[in-house]
Image (spheres, helix red, strand yellow):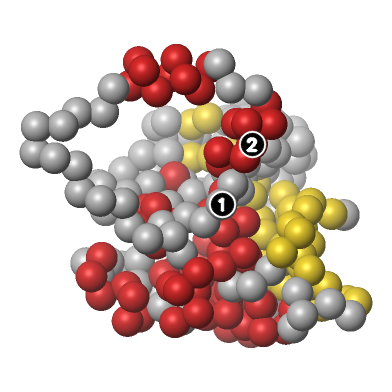
């Protein structure tokens, strides 16, 4: 399995695209009519055969959030990653995570202004998010060089700690925002399945563009829904 960056139109019959791979396809409109942003490319068939793009993984996300994987998902061959978590009520964590992400996914076509989101998303999810940062002074500027200098002097443990902790709601929403201001057209994971298999424990499985992938928004989705002690698992 490999990753392929495809910035422009791809010849579906091209022999330069190897089979058994997933690809991140970028571009306004991508290579599939009606699809904007990233998609999963699954090569199928023998060498020199026709290759096709599997967009059902993205298009079926809302359906899987509401009712789990269906028969049509069994025909897909996505790269799946599972994240386990601990919670007093893992079923409630999954329900809250489903509700929060479904609320975002179903509004991708008509993205609300930020002020509306606290009323749209589950109350517990919003309450667990960090307070929004204060607006900078009009003449204030971010010193990128100073920030990079400080970051480079930090130990791996300090960097890991700095990346943990609550996300603000605006930071989390930015990962799904499909407008020019957001990063929704560059997502790296899509909901696949979730469940509980032991007392006090549950798991969330996602389809990804490969490994590693940008998992921060996924981890915060689970944490803000009440999950703790998150870890990757088979």
**Residue drawn at (76%, 65%) of the image:** 85
Q: Position of residue 124 (x, y in %)?
A: 50, 79
Label whose residue precedes the other's in the sequence (1 or 2): 2
Q: Residues within 10 Å of mark 1 (few under 14, many from 20)?
A: few
Q: Residue furthest left?
A: 138
**Does residue 60 appear anywhere in the picture?**
no
Q: CA distance from mark 1 to mark 2?
A: 10 Å
Q: Residues within 10 Å of mark 2 (few under 14, many from 20)?
A: few
Up-down relation of residue 204 to residue 64 (above or below) = above
Find out whether the residues at labels 1 and 2 contact each other: C-beta distance under 8 Å: no
Q: Nearer the viewer, residue 69 or 122?
A: 122
**Residue designated by label 2:** 160
Up-down relation of residue 75 to residue 45 (above or below) = below
Is residue 148 toward the left or the right of residue 63 in the image?
left
Is residue 152 toward the left or the right of residue 44 in the image?
left
Position of the N terminus by quadrant: top right
Q: What numbered label is drawn on residue 165?
A: 1
Q: Nearer the viewer, residue 33 or 95?
A: 95
Q: Position of residue 55 (x, y in %)?
A: 53, 57
Position of the C terminus by quadrant: bottom right
Up-down relation of residue 38 to residue 71 (above or below) = above
Q: Position of residue 158 (x, y in %)?
A: 63, 31
Label 2 SS: helix
């Amino acid at each position: 399995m490999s990753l392929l960056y495809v910035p422009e139109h791809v010849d579906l019959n091209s022999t330069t695209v190897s089979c058994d791979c997933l690809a991140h396809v970028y571009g306004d409109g991508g290579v599939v009519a009606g699809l904007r942003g990233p998609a999963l490319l699954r090569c199928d068939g023998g060498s020199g055969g026709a290759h096709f793009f599997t967009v059902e993984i993205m298009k079926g996300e809302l359906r899987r959030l509401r009712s789990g994987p269906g028969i049509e998902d069994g025909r897909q061959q996505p790269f799946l990653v599972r994240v386990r978590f601990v919670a007093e009520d893992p079923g409630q964590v999954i329900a809250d995570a489903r509700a929060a992400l479904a609320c975002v996914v179903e509004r991708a076509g008509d993205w609300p202004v930020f002020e509306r989101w606290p009323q749209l998303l589950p109350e517990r999810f919003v309450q667990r998010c960090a307070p929004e940062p204060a607006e900078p002074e009009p003449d204030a500027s971010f010193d990128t060089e100073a920030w990079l200098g400080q970051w480079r002097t930090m130990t791996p443990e300090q960097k890991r700690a700095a990346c943990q902790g609550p996300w603000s709601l605006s930071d989390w929403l930015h990962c799904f925002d499909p407008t020019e201001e957001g990063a929704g057209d560059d997502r790296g994971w899509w909901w696949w399945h979730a469940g509980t298999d032991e007392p006090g424990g549950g798991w969330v499985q996602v389809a990804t563009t490969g490994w590693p992938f940008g998992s921060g928004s996924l981890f915060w989705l689970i944490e803000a829904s009440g999950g703790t002690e998150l870890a990757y698992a088979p």
